[in-house]
Each structure stands twice: as C-alpha cells, then as structure tokens.
Image (spheres, rainbow, N blue to C red):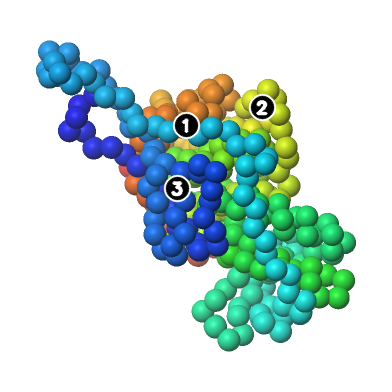
Amino acid sequence: MDANRPKASRPETMFFPTKADSGGNDSVSITPVERTKDVAAPTTHTKSNPTTLPKTKPPTKPLVKFRKRKRNSEISTSSLQTLSEDPWSVYIKGIEIFPRKGIFLAQNREDKMELVHIQQLKAEPASIQSLVKTVNDLSYRSFPRLLCHYQHEDHSFLVWEPVECSLSQVLGSKYVLSETEIASIVWPILIGIRYLRDCDRALATLTNDEVLFTGSGGVRIAGVERSCRIDPEDMNAATLKLTALSEIVKRLIKKNEKFDPDFPWSAEARNLPQRLDTVELDELMLDGFFASLKGEAELKLMVNIVNKTSHYDINFPARS
C-alpha cells in the first residue's frame, strides 16, 4: 500500500455525557461534544509495484480492530431514575411526530431551546422498567438516547433525544441521494448491528420507520428495546438484519432511478445489496464502498432539505 495515501475515516459521531461505553467498545468518549474517530471506515487498496517499496518495509495492512464478543455478564448497566410527576408540567406538548407510535414533539417550559420527543405508553410499570433497563444497558451511539422516564397515574412517558425525519420521509421525497450519502446511511447502521452482535443480540426488525436522522446528520436506529438475544451459531444475514438493510439499499437505488433513470451508479453501489446478503459482517466493515466517508455532516443537507420539502411538490436537478 502507498505509504503516502491518506486514510479515510468513518463518519464523525456526536457523543453525549450519559455514560462511558465499557467492555472494549472502541473507547467511547464521555465528553459532550468530542467526536470519536476510533472506528475507521475502510481504505481501498491497490497493488503496489514491489520494486518501488523499501526492502526493509513490507506493505502495511489496514489497522482494523475486531472486538471480542461480549457475554451478557460483561455488558455494563446503568439506571435511569423514574420521575413520579406529569411530564407536561415540565414540557409543552407539540405536534405528534410519529402518530403510529404516539410520539410528540415537546418544548421545555423553562429552556425554550430544548426540544425533545416524548413517547406516551400505557403498560404495567414493571414492563416499562424492563424496557427502560434494556435501553440503558444497550446505550450506544447508533441508537436514540433516552433522556428520562416519567410515571404519572397509569401512563409512562419516555423522553427521547429529538430526531428530524425517518428514512420513510427520505424515500417519499424527491431528493436524489449521492453514493456517499447512501454509504453514510448504511455505515452507522452496520456499526449498530455489530455492537448488538457483540452483545449476543440482534434487532427484532429494521424498517424504513426505524432508521432516523438527527439535525446534525446523525443516523439512529429505533427499537433497540425490542432487540433479542441470539446464539452466535444462529447469526447470519437474516437474523442480524443485514438482509433487511440490503432491501433498504435497493429502495434507495430505485428511488434515485425513479427521478433520474440514467443516474451513474458505480459497480460497488449496484452490488452492495448482494454483498450485504452474502458477506460476513466483519468483512463488510472493510468494504471499499465506505472509504469515501467524510463525517456525520455528510447527511445534514439531505435531512434539512427533506424536512423542508416533505409536504411540497419540489423537484431537484439531476446530481452529477
């Protein structure tokens, strides 16, 4: 490999000061705004002429760390105290963002700049406590951050970090995505899938409504509280939801072609769904398709445009 070739890195990801991820998880930061660069996107490699390399320095290999799978006893847990009060005394209820899930946009009454999503649930307190514990135990950058939990009368309320839109809205828009934007969507989902695999778990489902985007361009996967324990020998493309991710990529490719039939896809992009179906997860993390990733902000423009145009009939020019 050419020693002067710059190394590509995966999207920068915002972390929040909830807790440090332990058990060997890529040295997660606990500072509010520090961006981690510990999980690098793969770098494509070309064959070098042996005669041009110093005899004392053989070609180097990509520095990729494979984590040892963590058993259940090794997964750190954290607690989120239940607040016994009406959350609407703290927040002002706004519009219902995801009607099928009963999630509302809300504004802090004292700090008007604080916006959150509040999910109202009606279930036995013990069931809600179990759900909250699962979310806390599996807290990770790929999943929405649970801020607090209220119990008032016979309802529970989960306060989540806000997101701007879902993949369903992206697919329903006329925004034409670039290959780098598609890679920027797929890569953090793979990171989340790998994290759960290392905890001997897997997502129960992975749908368009469960892929969410923050205002900064971050990707979150909803539904970690419904993830399932899975034996290592039963892990495959279907159980890890790589097959579901493959279908998502197919929809993204088809969406572009709907508005731009001659969109110039590369061979790597066209073959990505097949690789998601057939290639082992750790090998996928080395796929050269992700080598062009520049950072979390890569999706910020897409999120902003989709948010502003989801209710309007606006066309975009073809992307070169």
Amino acid carrying label 3: it is Ser
Instruction: Tell me the residue that label 1 is attached to.
Output: 66
Callouts 3 and 2 close, C-beta under 8 Å: no
The image shows residue 69 at horizontal and vertical percentages of: 58, 33
Instruction: Tell me the residue that label 3 is attached to.
Output: 27
Q: Residue at x 39, y 59 (%)?
A: 34
- Crowding near the residue tagged with mark 2, few <14, some 14–19, many ≥20 C-alpha atoms within 10 Å: few
Instruction: Tell me the residue that label 2 is attached to.
Output: 232
- In three-dimensional space, the C-alpha distance between marks 2 and 1, rounded to whole angstroms, equals 16 Å
- Crowding near the residue tagged with mark 1, few <14, some 14–19, many ≥20 C-alpha atoms within 10 Å: few
Which numbered disc flags the more N-terminal residue, 3 or 1? 3
Amino acid carrying label 1: it is Phe
Callouts 3 and 1 close, C-beta under 8 Å: no
Amino acid carrying label 2: it is Pro
Query: Can the viewer see residue 222?
Result: no
Which one is in front, 235 or 258?
235
Left or right: residue 162 versus residue 12 is right
